[in-house]
Image (cartoon, rainbow, N blue to C red):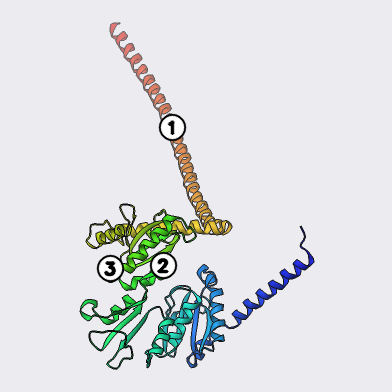
Amino acid sequence: MAAAPGGRQRCLLWAAVVAHVVASGAGFVEDLDESFKENRKDDIWLVDFYAPWCGHCKKLEPVWNEVGTEMRNMGSPVKVGKMDATSFSSIASEFGVRGYPTIKLLKGDLAYNYRGPRTKDDIIEFANRVAGPLIRPLPSQHMFEHVQKRHRVLFVYVGGESPLKYVTLPELPAVMVFKDGTYFVYDEYEDGDLSSWINRERFQGYLHVDGFTLYELGDTGKLVAIAVIDDKNSSVEHTRLKSIIQEVARDYRDHFHRDFQFGHMDGNDYINSLLMDDLTIPTIVVLNTSNQQYFLPDRHIESTEDMVQFINNILDGTAEAQGGDGLLQRIKRIIYDAKSTIVSVFKSSPLLGCFLFGLPLGVISIMCYGICTADTEGEVFEHEGAKKESGDRELTDEGSEEEQEEEKNAKYTELSDGELKQKDIMEKKKD
């Protein structure tokens, strides 16, 4: 059915508006080239190093355009750009780019990696925080409350003249972290090295975990307890497991926060590739990102108490660890990754898959066929040569038999003549 003239005009108008919005957002993001290396030091840059063929990079692109627009509208001194790391690989290598996309804030001679969720608000918060002074003074309670609202996790050094009068501290000076609606004080004897403690505590107690966040959690040295669910599924089982993890993270923080990070993951695609197994969701899995081991509950998790018992079993070593980074697991990983790559290529583009894998296989098959055919023909020629030689030998043998027969006949003839002569002599004697 043909669209009405008015409806068609409205569609064209909306398309024009969308195109204008997209173009406007992209206009605040600069495409960088080789000249960026020399010109960047006068400004602070937030750069997305991407590859044109990378699916994650394409997913980040509209978010990155929003970041560029927001940073420009708020008057931030940070400039937003993007660079094709495959076209300018030497520059990307100098900045330590190892994967795509890689987000870095470049400030003078320093480069800061962004390792948080790839959302507009999180990226902007990172840029504003890193672009400012490394340590920001909080001269008043009002300023502290303002800064606290902008940061999910806030580390504060409290000196002898601290304006935080409502915070009761056993001794000063002190280092604290404000997160999850409360605060925790650094204890040198229990928490060890200060930098290690900050690294462990830089995440909220409960997270929405994705593949990138899980990679960053590996630096904390903590085990990661995840409820693997479907966010779009509102059934009781999915919401119950998520609630159980949240309750353990909140109510048992003092017991487990030094060893465990809690969260949930939407869907099982990434976790399946990580575990090289097909997990039925909803389920709970505990990952050890340092050695690629994982733990699955041996019985159904029905309550918070069940989850606490499962965690205690892991801590005391009675829970069975699976996976790991041993030799067999590495070989299994190589086979699994190769299989997954081939399947994903064929699913996304069957023609490309046939070209990438069919052409080499076809060439190899032709080469093998040629080698096998050449060997077969050589065997045939050799067999025919041997047969011919055998025939010549038979002919030669036959000739020898004829000569032997002639010699035999000759001897027989000679013998017959001798016998005749002897017979004549005997007759003469008789006479």
Identify residue for label 2. Answer: 209
Query: For the residues carrying marks 1 and 2, which lies nearer the camera in this image?
Result: 2
Tell me which amino acid carries mark 1: Glu
Tell me which amino acid carries mark 2: Val
Residues at circles 3 and 1 in contact by the CB criterion of under 8 Å: no
Residue at the spot 22% in from the left edge and 81% down from the top edge:
188
- Count residues near mark 2 (Cα–Cα under 10 Å), then give few for <14, some for 14-19, many for 20+: many
Callout 2: SS: loop
Residue 320: horizontal and vertical position, in percent? 27, 56
Cα separation between marks 3 and 2: 18 Å
Residue at the spot 48% in from the left edge and 44% down from the top edge:
376
Query: For the residues carrying marks 3 and 2, which lies nearer the camera in this image?
Result: 3
Disc number at residue 394?
1
Mark with earlier residue (1, 2): 2
Identify residue for label 3. Answer: 256
Callout 3: SS: helix
- Work out which quarter of the rendered image holds the C terminus and state it: top left
- Count residues near mark 3 (Cα–Cα under 10 Å), then give few for <14, some for 14-19, many for 20+: some
Disc number at residue 12?
none
